[in-house]
Amino acid sequence: MSTESDKQVVRAYFEAFSENRFDDALAQTSDDFQLLGRGKRVNNHVMDKAQCRAAFEAMGRVIASRFPLTIHSMTAEDGRVAVQATSKVPMKDGPDYENNYIFLCTLRDGKIATMEEYACTHTVVTDMNSRRGGPVEQAAELAATAG
């Protein structure tokens, strides 16, 4: 695939995710997809497709409507797409959740095979996990009960 095609796949993923169309987002991923949180002490996880779906759905407990991610730049080369993005998420119980992200997506056969997520872990802990009980960190449990 071309770098533009790779970018289109990644853009489609984030557009669907931002609109809570999780099945459409995950349709852009390979069967063996893995989301890797790259924090050192928190937001450090490896989730498969089922675990991602469970974690995404669990966010509905604390966010007011959806989790919009704004893409500011994308760079593609050799089957990889780097994305610089920000979030501003309305929460049910107070101030918006805002964070900065770098995502490194590796594509295979026109699908996202891996996505590495780099974000401000201090913000994850203080502004998100304290509100939701950390469902991303508990994604394996969530996926097991979702099945």
Image (cartoon, grey):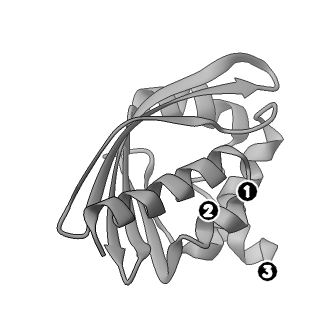
- Disc nearer the start of the sequence (3/2): 2
21 displayed left or right of 42? right
Label 1 neighbour load within 10 Å: few <14, some 14-19, many 20+: some
**Front label number (3 vs 2):** 2
Q: Amino acid at mark 1?
A: Arg
Secondary structure state at the residue bearing disc 2? helix
Cα distance in 3D space between marks 1 and 3: 19 Å
Give the residue type at disc 3.
Answer: Gly
Q: Which residue is mark 1?
A: 21
* Residue 137 percent coordinates (x, y): 56, 54
User: Which secondary structure lies at badge 3?
Assistant: loop
Q: Secondary structure at mark 1?
A: loop
Within 10 Å of disc 3 (Cα), the crowding (few <14, some 14-19, many 20+) is few
Residue where numbered disc 2 is placed: 25
- Name the quarter where the N terminus is drawn: bottom left
C-beta proximity under 8 Å, tags 2 and 1: yes
Give 122 or 24, whichever is nearer the viewer.
24
Q: Nearer the viewer, residue 120 or 109?
A: 109
Q: Position of residue 92 (x, y in %)?
A: 82, 26
- Residue ID at (17%, 68%): 78
Disc number placed over residue 147 in the picture, else none: 3
In the rendered image, residue 61, in percent from the top left (x then y), is placed at 82, 42
Labels 1, 3: front one? 1
Q: Quadrant of residue 79?
A: bottom left
Q: Nearer the viewer, residue 70 or 35?
A: 70
* Relative side of 25 to 90, left or right: left
